[in-house]
């Protein structure tokens, strides 16, 4: 599924299947999710007149800067809820996952978000790539790596509830404040029963393994 509504329906279904205790937990998660969305909306609705553009690089496999997603994708849904516009929306539509290099460079995205196992490699490479050197996101240093824990936060795991405020905070740091470390610790305590240290929370936010290492550091 790609839509937020279908994602939430699956959480509800999970509670219905597993019984009353699970239903209470699933309902608590859905309330948290709706609260996060409402908070981002309340704080950005009247201050964002023109959404920031955001280009997503899918680094799950080693396929370079132009493996991505388009309109109707998970990341499109996240962008909309974060008051951003996916830079590929006018170029490709889900399930297409490759964009023409010249086309996306001509859009000149203001922000780049890199996910997947190769995110650290691609992060280093994009700053060294000639074709990206004059793109706003690279020139201004607005390139970000997706936090990762049980899953990358931009996937349809429960962590998508963290990806929305995280995205809003990196795109609009003056208008949306997000205490990422403490919220991460609180989230996993509440919904997984696991108590993270601040160090572990920072590893998650930096897209590192539980040992603080890059999953893939180089080719």
Image (spheres, rainbow, N blue to C red):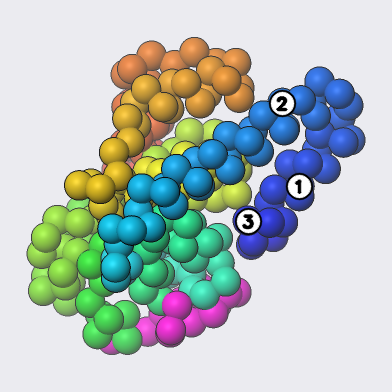
| Horizontal side of residue 147 vs 112, given as left or right | right
- Which residue lies at the image location 63% right of the left edge and 36% below the top edge? 31
Q: Mark 3 points at which residue?
A: 4
Q: Give residue 46's quadrant in the image.
A: bottom left
Looking at the image, tell me whether mark 3 or mark 1 is earlier in sequence order. 3
- Which residue lies at the image location 43% right of the left edge and 84% below the top edge? 90
Q: Name the residue under label 1.
A: 10
Q: Where in the figure is residue 218, as x and y percent of width and height?
A: 28, 48
Does the magenta-highlighted stretch encompass residue 172?
A: no
- Which residue lies at the image location 49% right of the left edge and 65% below the top edge? 76
Q: Name the residue under label 2.
A: 25
Mark 1 to mark 2: distance in Å? 13 Å
- Residue at the outermost front position: 46
Compared to residue 66, the image places residue 181 above or below, namely above
| Mark 1 neighbour density, 10 Å: few (under 14) some (14–19) many (20 or more) | some
Residue 171 in sight in this render? yes
Mark 3 to mark 1: distance in Å? 10 Å
Give the numbered dot on residue 133: none
- Which residue lies at the image location 51% right of the left edge and 26% below the top edge? 187
Residue 211 in sight in this render? no
| Horizontal side of residue 172 vs 23, given as left or right | left
Looking at the image, tell me whether mark 2 or mark 3 is earlier in sequence order. 3
- The span shown in magenta is 89-102
Kindly report the secondary structure that dominates the magenta region of the rendered protein.
loop
Secondary structure under badge 1? helix
Secondary structure under badge 3? helix
């Amino acid at each position: 599924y790609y839509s937020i509504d279908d994602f939430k329906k699956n959480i509800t279904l999970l509670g219905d299947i597993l019984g009353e205790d699970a239903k209470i937990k699933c309902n608590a998660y859905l309330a948290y999710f709706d609260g996060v969305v409402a908070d981002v909306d309340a704080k950005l609705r009247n201050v964002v007149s023109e959404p920031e553009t955001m280009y997503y690089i899918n680094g799950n496999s080693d396929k370079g800067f132009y493996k991505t997603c388009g309109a109707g994708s998970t990341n499109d849904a996240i962008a909309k809820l974060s008051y951003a516009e996916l830079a590929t929306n006018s170029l490709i539509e889900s399930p297409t996952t490759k964009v023409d290099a010249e086309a996306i460079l001509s859009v000149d995205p203001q922000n780049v978000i890199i996910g997947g196992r190769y995110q650290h490699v691609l992060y280093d490479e994009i700053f060294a790539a000639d074709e990206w050197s004059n793109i706003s996101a690279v020139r201004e240093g607005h390139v970000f790596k997706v936090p990762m824990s049980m899953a990358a936060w931009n996937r349809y795991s429960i962590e998508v509830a963290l990806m929305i405020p995280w995205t809003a905070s990196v795109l609009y740091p003056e208008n949306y404040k997000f205490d990422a470390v403490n919220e991460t610790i609180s989230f996993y305590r509440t919904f997984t029963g696991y108590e993270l240290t601040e160090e572990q929370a920072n590893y998650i936010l930096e897209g590192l393994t539980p040992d603080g290492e890059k999953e893939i550091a180089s080719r």
